[in-house]
Image (tube, rainbow, N blue to C red):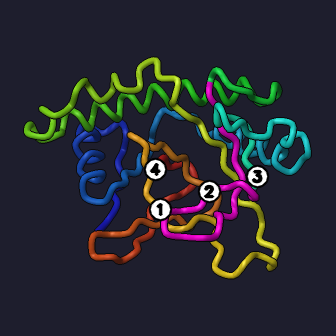
Amino acid sequence: MQVRVVDYRAADAAEQFTRSLHETGFGVLVNHPIPQCLVEKIYADWLKFFDGQDKHLFAFSKETQDGYFSTEISETAKGFTQKDIKEYFHIYPWGRIPAPLKDDAMRYYGIANTLAAELLSWVEAHTPAEIARGYREPLSRMIQDSRQTLLRVLRYPPLTGQEPAGSLRAAPHGDINLLTILPAANEPGLQVQGKDGQWVDVPCDFGMLI
């Protein structure tokens, strides 16, 4: 099993990307429209935010699920008992966003949302007819004007050696979203489990889009 690396600008990009999703659940794009300089600036600016104390002023809301989620209230993957060792911030256009970070976050949100609609149209165009008949509406339209499209800014803090036994930065899990767009992190480690149960590294050079 191999996750395909697809040139977004290639003539057969839609077919290759959709095939990779079908075979592995993942697709990797290069030469995509999300500016790497914007990604790097967001990484740097939000790292300062996570390293500071103002993040606690944006503690998550149970009602709206926006704001800052600390390592103490992080996610627990299905089948596991220890929480993931990560902290993150949930951004919605209608939600709370630190003022100095808002413009870049919303610029990224807009570009990524447009790209998501295009990628969903790729999937729709290459969906077998017998499956496509089950769509209640075009895939790309399912996120149009959605208030539930989420931008998560995620940070895995340095390990201290005091972590509980069995804890992981991110335990094996499956996403429940229609589509997840993930800019490659500045450290490797992402893997996908094949149908044979074996774990395979996902190509994730800094600048790729997964």
Among the two numbered marks 2 and 3 on one chain, the one whose residue lies closer to the N terminus: 3
Identify which residue is drawn at 82% across, 27% down: 100
Asked if labels 3 and 4 touch by Cβ distance under 8 angstroms, the answer is no
Q: Nearer the viewer, mark 4 or mark 2?
A: 2
Residue type at mark 2 is Glu
Q: CA distance from mark 3 to mark 1?
A: 19 Å
Q: Which residue is mark 4?
A: 210
Residue type at mark 1 is His
Asked if labels 3 and 2 touch by Cβ distance under 8 angstroms, the answer is no
Percent x, y for residue 166?
A: 63, 79
Q: Which mark is residue 75?
A: 2
Q: CA distance from mark 2 to mark 1?
A: 11 Å
Asked if labels 1 and 2 touch by Cβ distance under 8 angstroms, the answer is yes
Q: In screen coordinates, is 86 left or right of 196?
A: right
Residue 37 visible in the displayed image: no
- Residue closest to the eye, 63 or 110: 63
Percent x, y for residue 199?
A: 40, 74
Q: In screen coordinates, is 54 left or right of 156?
A: right
Q: CA distance from mark 2 to mark 3?
A: 10 Å
Identify which residue is drawn at 41% across, 46% down: 29
Identify which residue is drawn at 81% across, 36% down: 58
Q: Which residue is mark 3?
A: 70
Q: Secondary structure at mark 1?
A: loop
- Residue 72 forms part of the magenta stretch: yes
